[in-house]
């Protein structure tokens, strides 16, 4: 009862109706390309040549998904290898990023040591750096570390994500009370012990969020300037090769797009509430 | 408060633990983010082709960039247009939709949140847009226009200098409800309902007044964070253009600074010159961020 009264403060019926209509129209617009992707993936080859073209597949088939795998039957590197590369790079990069970010974020949020504030300011400024800007120098660095043309050329640079660190730091700062840590210190717990035993379990939503973001970014890694060996390239690169095949490969390309988009979406749906919890603490002070 | 803390009060244990925990992140961070940025500022004053040692040439690269490179000027213009439309556009759309979603019930909100967020994580959707916008008989948009009797000649959307920019803007905005959008959704859910009751007692009469006097001021931290994210993505439009419309775009009609950068760095190996381009882009982004922080400090006043 009380809830109902609350919701009606300053709310006109017309306004609510308008909001529903607006949201529904735009939700359809947002989803249309995604639905088009799915329906294209289900179209048999002849339907791609229909004029005028149809939005929905008339005789849906999973032939395109089969083609997607058979296209690579005669190639030097099988599709499974590309898939393995993507999974390998995504998993290792994500694990590294989450561990390093949460350790550093905890230090920046809760421990007092020299240069702490400067470190955080630099990280905030670097939220604006784009990877294209750093790509030239990164190539030189990776070359001098002998990492060009290895998995590490993709994995190691992904470890230090300013965005992940920023989100984690804000979350730790606001969700872990200082008094809890003080109590731990009085009981004689070591600082690193407290990070692992007290802080980490409390920030589960934040590291789930980091996992999702890191995984999304790495999952979509395409061709990079640091890897040339065909057998080290990612599934996204392989799909872009199929997409370059023109109309005859449209179906397989669409099928590939659908597979690539479904994975991050499922991950997001599972973790949505944790992500929103993390985002609630992400605000920036002037 | 924090600044008043005396510096000498560091506990040895905390300093040691702090450094142990922070350094593993900072080594790759310095190596792959900070040093490259500083490095490209330094390299921008050299002539360097990755093979021979760099030659110091002073401000030659910048002089060439601003006075002789007409394509850079074109790229600068395009980048500004895209940044001015996609940046604020994506930012405002993210906020509007987050705000509208916050006005409806939680169950439907969860589903619609997914609908709006999905495009930004759908990965490489370029091929789908290409099918949709194709200029041949398979193009779906052309066929709609044909059936509605609006146009009887097909438009080659992705190769026509007049349609290329609007298309890029639409596709970018379509996928722009990303991190900022989630930040806003979460921020709005965190606003305490009792503020609105208090506002109603104090004489706020509709949603708009609530938005301006209560919601926006409370959301300022989220607004600032999202602004940074929006600037980064709006100035960084480049790969999408190459994937969607080919490289370079017809008559450089959608050439951006980012494309110009990849051209000189990745194709021509004029690394010094490319670094100058990167430095200019970076300076523009910082300037833009300062302006936005000024603007946002006026919210709710």
Image (spheres, coloured by chain):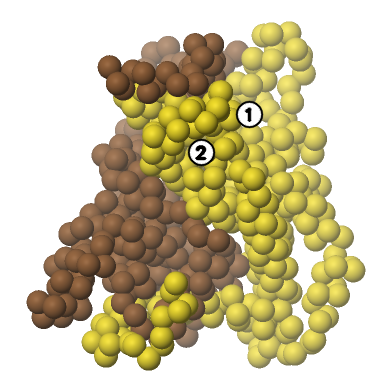
Chain colours: A brown, B yellow
Res A232 quadrant in image: bottom left
Q: Residue at x 75, y 51 (%)?
A: B80
Which residue lies most toward the front here? B202
Q: Residue at x 38, y 52 (%)?
A: A281
Q: Residue at x 44, y 83 (%)?
A: A115
Q: Position of residue A166 (x, y in %)?
A: 42, 62
- Residue matched to label 2: B215
Specify the quadrant that holds the N terminus of chain A. Answer: top left
Q: Position of residue B254 (x, y in %)?
A: 74, 46
Residue A268 appears in the rendering: yes
* Chain at numbered mark 2: B
In this picture, residue B159 sits left or right of residue B99: right
Q: Does A70 sit above or below residue B247?
A: above
In this picture, residue B281 sits left or right of residue A196: right
Question: Dot 2: within a 10 Å radius of its alpha carbon, few (fewer than 14), some, or many (20 or more) residues?
Answer: many
Query: Mark 2 touching mark 1, by CB under 8 A?
Result: no
Q: Residue at x 51, y 72 (%)?
A: A121
Res B70 quadrant in image: bottom right
Question: Dot 1: within a 10 Å radius of its alpha carbon, few (fewer than 14), some, or many (20 or more) residues?
Answer: many
Mark 2 / mark 1, whichever is N-terminal:
1
Q: Does A73 sit above or below residue B293?
A: above
Which residue lies most toward the right here? B67
Q: Are marks 2 and 1 on the same chain?
A: yes
Say which mark, if any, is on residue B133. 1
Q: Does B103 sit above or below residue A198?
A: above
Res B152 quadrant in image: top right
Q: Secondary structure at mark 1?
A: helix
Q: Secondary structure at mark 2?
A: helix
> Which of B200/A64 is in front?
B200
């Amino acid at each position: 009862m009380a809830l109902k009264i609350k919701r009606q403060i300053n709310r006109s019926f017309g306004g609510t109706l308008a909001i529903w209509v607006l949201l529904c129209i735009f939700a359809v617009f947002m989803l249309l390309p995604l639905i088009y992707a799915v329906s294209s993936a289900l179209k048999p080859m002849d339907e791609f040549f229909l004029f005028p073209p149809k939005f929905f597949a008339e005789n849906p088939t999973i032939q395109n998904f089969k083609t997607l795998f058979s296209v690579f039957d005669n190639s030097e590197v099988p599709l499974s290898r590309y898939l393995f590369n993507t999974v390998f790079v995504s998993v290792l990069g994500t694990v590294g990023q989450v561990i390093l970010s949460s350790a550093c974020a905890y230090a920046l949020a809760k421990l007092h040591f020299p240069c702490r504030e400067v470190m955080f300011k630099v990280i905030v400024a670097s939220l604006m750096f784009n990877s294209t800007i750093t790509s030239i120098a990164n190539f030189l660095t990776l070359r001098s570390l002998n990492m060009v043309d290895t998995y590490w050329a993709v994995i190691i640079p992904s470890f230090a994500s300013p965005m992940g660190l920023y989100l984690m730091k804000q979350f730790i700062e606001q969700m872990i009370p200082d008094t809890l840590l003080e109590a731990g210190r009085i009981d004689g717990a070591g600082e690193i012990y407290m990070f692992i035993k007290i802080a980490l379990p409390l920030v589960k939503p934040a590291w789930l969020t980091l996992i999702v973001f890191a995984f999304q970014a790495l999952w979509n890694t395409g061709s990079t300037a640091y890897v040339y060996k065909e057998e080290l390239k990612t599934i996204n690169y392989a799909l872009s090769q199929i997409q370059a095949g023109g109309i005859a490969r449209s179906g397989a390309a669409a099928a590939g797009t659908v597979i690539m988009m479904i994975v991050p979406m499922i991950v997001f749906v599972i973790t949505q509430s944790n992500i929103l919890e993390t985002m609630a603490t992400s605000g920036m002070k002037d | 408060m924090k600044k008043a803390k005396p510096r000498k009060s560091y506990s040895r244990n905390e300093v040691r633990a702090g450094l142990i925990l922070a350094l593993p992140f900072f080594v790759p961070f310095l190596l792959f983010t900070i040093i490259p940025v500083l490095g490209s500022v330094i390299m921008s004053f050299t002539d360097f082709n990755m093979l021979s040692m760099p030659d110091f040439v002073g401000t030659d690269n910048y002089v060439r960039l601003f006075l002789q490179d007409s394509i850079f000027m074109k790229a600068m213009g395009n980048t500004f247009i895209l940044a001015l439309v996609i940046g604020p556009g994506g930012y405002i759309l993210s906020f509007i939709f987050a705000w509208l979603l916050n006005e409806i019930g939680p169950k439907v909100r969860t589903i619609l949140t997914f609908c709006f967020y999905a495009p930004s994580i759908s990965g490489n959707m370029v091929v789908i847009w290409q099918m949709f916008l194709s200029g041949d008989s398979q193009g779906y948009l052309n066929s709609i226009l044909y059936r509605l009797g609006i146009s009887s000649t097909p438009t080659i959307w992705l190769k026509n200098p007049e349609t290329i920019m609007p298309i890029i803007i639409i596709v970018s905005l379509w996928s722009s409800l990303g991190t900022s959008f989630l930040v806003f959704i979460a921020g709005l859910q965190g606003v305490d309902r009792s503020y609105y009751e208090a506002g109603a007692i104090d004489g706020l009469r509709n949603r708009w007044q609530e938005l301006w006097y209560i919601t926006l001021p409370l959301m300022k931290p989220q607004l600032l964070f999202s602004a940074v994210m929006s600037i980064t993505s709006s100035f960084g439009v480049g790969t999408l253009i190459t994937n969607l419309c080919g490289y370079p775009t017809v008559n450089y009609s959608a050439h951006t600074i980012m494309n110009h950068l990849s051209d000189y760095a990745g194709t021509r190996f004029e690394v010094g010159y490319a670094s100058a381009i990167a430095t200019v882009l970076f300076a523009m982004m910082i300037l833009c961020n300062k302006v936005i922080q000024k603007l946002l400090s006026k919210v709710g006043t």
